[in-house]
Image (cartoon, coloured by chain):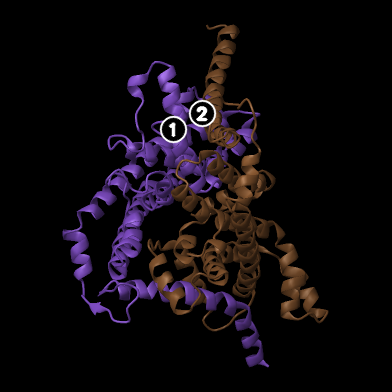
Chain colours: A brown, B purple
Amino acid sequence: MRTIAYYKSKKIAVNLIIHIFLIAVTITCLFPLFWMVSSSLKTQGTIFKDMSLIPKELHFENYVLAWKEGGFGRYFLNSILYTTSVVAGIIIISSLAAYAFSRFKFPGRNILFFMFIAAMMIPIPGSFVPLYVLLNKLHLRNTALGYILCMVNVGLSTSIFLLKTFFDKLPRELEDAARIDGCSKIGIWWHVALPLAKPVLAVVVVFNALNVWNEYVLALIIFDNKNLMPLQRALVMFQGEFLTNYPLLMAGLTITALPIIIIYFMMQKYIVKGVTSGALFG
Amino acid sequence: MRIKNTLENYLFVSPAAIIFIIFYVIPFIWVFQLGLYEWDGILPTRSFVGLGNFKEIFFEDKVWWQAMRNAGWITVIALTFQNALAFLLAWACDRQIKAKNFYRLIFFIPPVLSEVVVGLVWQWILDGNYGLLNHWLLNARFASLARNWLSDPATALNTVAIVHSWKGFGWGFLIFLAGLQTIPRELYEAARVDGANAWDSFRRITIPLMIPVAVLVSILTILGSMQAFILIIAMTDGGPAYHTQVPVLRILASMRGSSRFGYACAQGISFGLILMAVSFIQYRFSRKARDT
């Protein structure tokens, strides 16, 4: 018979190994971000020599420089504009459609819904080629509107799917009561269905916001005009133009990453929910 | 009244349908149409070449197949290293632990960052002359290990693949963890009562129940890794020479570099079909594994 002390120490040893492993991965996850911020506070003169993790002097003026001269203020506002308008568009358009798919009967309903789902499943790598041609024809290339419409389309299928699944499970009593009170269809959608859908809408908002903020390739083919570019596109361009100005580049990267990290920390619950519900449906 | 009712219903779906048709269906059809032409994307005239573009892809375009092999290699690393890491972490977190929520918060940070940000930060860390990694290696007297990680043909592809795995393991981790948490604890307790040790219950309970989850994670990993390219734009832009070229970068190069829109579409079709075939095979395979 082994003693209690043996089992206890074995358990402690196993837990210790597991924790060391988890902490090591945690450090690997956080360190690059830490180094990004640290580098953004050095100067062009010291960055190639000063390898200290926390710089002796903190040069916050890099952020002012990046914001003003680097143009990141402009790009930041562009990203905000694109993200908010795309998310707002997706919320309205996809919830209208999802509600109709769930509640109403009309000819072509199933085939249309099937098309949205098929679009979610079929990978078309290089779909940006015909989109480029299309936007040129519509004179929407190099316009904010063209980019916003393309990005609304990108988020549409998944959002409709998530919302329809939610509405399908939602009891209809409240909507029936509103109808008896004389509320119109559009009124029921706005006053009853949307408020009830808040938890799913949060998932839709978070995922689409991350997706638009982080998007690169459509911004690459749509925008030649610097004044319209969002952050991701501008960062790659900046790196190409100012090859070795690392402090400013790192400041730009921090400006780009920070809002995402803040939103992520605030809305983590919904992200976990979204990932795992997507997983369970597969 | 009924007609008005139906029209009203269409009003609900029409914004979504219109955007979808213009920005998804039409481009989708155009890909197949354009793939049969030689066209520079600007001139109104284009010449019909039939399946010529596809013939060129399959028999002449060596760089395309090199890009395919590179993406395949990145995918192999993601399937093995990245997913093994994701599973181990999920398993470690599931067994215990008070700090589970903390780890879950941290491990999903890389996936929410953009590929551009991740690529540029790592490119700075891995820089051959001024990068932190080489600085550490030199100081720790491992000077022989220091190298130009991203511009040395011997290491560039693997380095990119590792950074790709760093960015991606959080997805697998979250899905594995959710899967592990659906396994009833009573199963483990029953197994222990029957005299099974930790390894037995891992092999007999955890693994069989996790197969469907593992298949899902692998499909997502394959589709994601084969199509990865933005990270590569930010880190190496396909270089040195063609050592980190991947298919989507080639499509982009056909379109923007050599202005061959038809050829770019044909590349997209070939690649899309291969991806669909792979995930279909894997799906069938998993059905079989689940049924037996």
- Secondary structure under the numbered disc 1 in the rendered image: helix
Which disc, if any, is residue A239? none
Nearest the eye: B169 or B158: B158
Q: Which residue is mark 1?
A: B204
In the displayed structure, A200 sits above or below B231; it is below
Q: Quadrant of residue B152?
A: top left
Mark 2 and mark 1 in contact? Answer it, CB < 8 Å: yes
Chain of the residue where label 2 is placed in the rendered structure: B
Q: Which residue is mark 2?
A: B191
Instruction: Please identify the residue farthest to the front as the structure is shown.
Output: A45
User: In the image, what residue type sits under mark 2?
Assistant: Ala
Q: Position of residue A238 (x, y in %)?
A: 49, 50
Determine whether, in the image, residue A266 is placed left or right of residue A42. Answer: right
Inter-mark Cα distance, 2 to 1: 9 Å
Q: Quadrant of the N terminus of chain B?
A: bottom right
Q: Is residue A247 visible?
A: yes
Q: Earlier in the sequence, mark 2 or mark 1?
A: 2
- Secondary structure under the numbered disc 2 in the rendered image: helix
* Circles 2 and 1 on the same subunit: yes
Q: Position of residue A256 (x, y in %)?
A: 59, 48
